């Protein structure tokens, strides 16, 4: 389990590094470089538009890689998705700016961001299922939470590199070539992630499905026919997590630097410190999920998010580092209260034969609902000179929507992960 957890954590860290480094670049430099004819606000909105494309392609990636995972195994998904995302990220760092390539430059960004999202849409399902299906029942949430620590590690890596370059280079150097370095580094990280995953074995539950001939022939069709309500509920339930995280990590970064005049370095440090706290808290929240259940933790996290959005926006608007850090930390602790147990909760909701497709599609549709639109809507709603209360209202509304969806989902503890139908008949 230690080896599996480490490999899953490392892989998701690399994949989310690739995904997050684009979000940071979109908040800091992509607007002026690839949309120079737009106003500063319109350029940021356009850059966030390319950022959103990655979320729109994630459900398609979950369908493609989910089919592979349910038909051919969880292990192949972890290799193919990592290669695709890493290659697309390196390519982003090589795209010339609008000044050199014209309109083809933002078009290439869109295509590569689409491919990034495609790979990440498959990564989560493969990494989580490989860990959750090997884990002992009473510690499933704890072991399955390790892939959920990966996003925090990936975020810290992405922003740490950006922070070092931003602090060590002049503004002109950073805009000319410095922002590209984190994208090029993705190639080395992907190679290391692949090396760690070479020793992984297939999950016992998939091997049982293959041996008994009970694999789904068309997983997406089965999910659409028999689990569509569950997919919609899980997508709505998880939307608040994406909205909160990307409001903190992407929109707040742009808002702080452009509207409040806070330096890039200060904003990055505040956000990174809050994400580090979130990463440390993840296994502790997961242990609570193993003891008290998945659903209670999710309901508590949604309620906390709904109550904290207005205070967070108020603290952000002060522009003071310590107060901004407190606002971000409160939001991310509410987020991780939910997402620490999700890696165990979603697989437990679906039967093994369609688990990779069902869990991944629900998880990534939530990204479209909560992650793709949040930086765009928040940027548009943050007009005026006072605190952006419209952003707080938007995030609170999503939190209440997710709270209602979680209330309609069943509890799965101490229910074990379902076994294949033939095994149940034999028993």
Image (cartoon, rainbow, N blue to C red):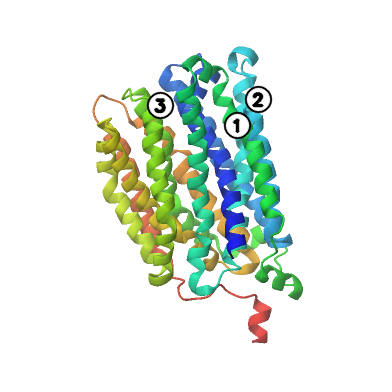
- Judged by depth in the image, the label closer to the viewer, 3 or 2, is 3
Q: Position of residue 229 (x, y in %)?
A: 50, 61
Instruction: Give whichever of discs 3 and 1 has the lower sequence position.
Output: 1
- At label 2, counting other C-alpha atoms closer than 10 Å, the crowd grade (few under 14, some 14-19, many 20 or more) is few
Q: Position of residue 292 (x, y in %)?
A: 38, 71
Do the CB atoms of the residues marked 3 and 1 lie less than 8 Å apart? no
- At label 3, counting other C-alpha atoms closer than 10 Å, the crowd grade (few under 14, some 14-19, many 20 or more) is some
Q: Quadrant of residue 295?
A: bottom left
For marks 3 and 1, give the CA distance: 19 Å
Which secondary structure lies at badge 3?
helix
Disc sitting over residue 94 in the figure = 2
Residue designated by label 1? 183
For marks 2 and 1, give the CA distance: 8 Å
Residue 181 against residue 244 in the figure, above or below = above
Taking the spot 37% from the left edge, 34% from the top edge, the residue there is: 252
Examine the rendering and report whether any part of residue 393 can be seen.
no
Examine the rendering and report whether any part of residue 114 can be seen.
yes
Do the CB atoms of the residues marked 2 and 1 lie less than 8 Å apart? yes
From the image, which quarter does the C terminus lie in?
Answer: bottom right
Which secondary structure lies at badge 2?
loop
Residue designated by label 3? 264
């Amino acid at each position: 389990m230690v080896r599996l957890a480490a490999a899953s954590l490392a892989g998701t860290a690399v994949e989310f590094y690739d995904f997050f480094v684009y979000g940071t670049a979109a908040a800091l430099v992509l607007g002026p470089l690839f949309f120079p004819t737009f106003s500063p606000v319109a350029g940021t909105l356009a850059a966030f538009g390319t950022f959103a494309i990655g979320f729109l392609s994630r459900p398609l990636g979950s369908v493609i890689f989910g089919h592979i995972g349910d038909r051919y195994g969880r292990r192949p998904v972890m290799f193919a998705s990592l290669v695709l995302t890493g290659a697309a990220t390196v390519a982003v760092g090589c795209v010339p700016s609008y000044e050199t390539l014209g309109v083809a430059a933002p078009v290439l960004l869109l295509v590569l961001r689409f491919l990034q999202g495609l790979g990440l849409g498959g990564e989560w399902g493969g990494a989580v299922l490989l860990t959750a299906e090997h884990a002992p029942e009473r510690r499933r949430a704890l072991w399955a939470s390790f892939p959920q620590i990966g996003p925090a590690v990936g975020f810290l890596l992405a922003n740490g590199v950006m922070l070092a370059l931003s602090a060590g280079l002049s503004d002109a150097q950073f805009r000319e070539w410095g922002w590209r370095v984190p994208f090029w580094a993705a190639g080395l990280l992907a190679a290391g992630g692949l090396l760690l995953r070479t020793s992984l074995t297939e999950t016992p539950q998939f091997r049982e499905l293959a041996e008994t001939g009970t694999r789904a022939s068309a997983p997406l069709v089965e999910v659409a026919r028999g689990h569509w309500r569950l997919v919609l509920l899980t997508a709505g339930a998880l939307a608040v997590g994406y909205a909160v995280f990307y409001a903190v990590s992407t929109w707040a970064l742009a808002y702080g630097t452009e509207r409040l005049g806070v330096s890039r370095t200060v904003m990055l440090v505040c956000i990174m410190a809050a994400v580090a706290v979130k990463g440390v808290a993840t296994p502790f929240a997961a242990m609570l999920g193993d003891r008290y259940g998945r659903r209670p933790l999710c309901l508590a996290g949604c309620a906390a998010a709904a109550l904290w959005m207005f205070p967070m926006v108020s603290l952000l608007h002060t522009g003071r580092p310590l107060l901004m850090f407190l606002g971000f930390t409160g939001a991310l602790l509410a987020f991780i209260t939910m997402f620490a147990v999700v890696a165990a909760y979603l697989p437990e909701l679906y039967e093994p034969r369609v688990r990779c497709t069902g869990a991944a599609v629900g998880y990534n549709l939530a990204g479209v609902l909560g992650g793709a639109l949040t930086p765009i809507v928040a940027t548009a709603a943050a007009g005026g000179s006072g605190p952006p209360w419209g952003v707080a209202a938007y995030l609170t509304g999503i939190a209440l929507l997710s709270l209602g969806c979680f209330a309609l989902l069943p509890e799965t503890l101490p229910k074990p992960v379902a076994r294949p139908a033939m095994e149940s008949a034999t028993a």
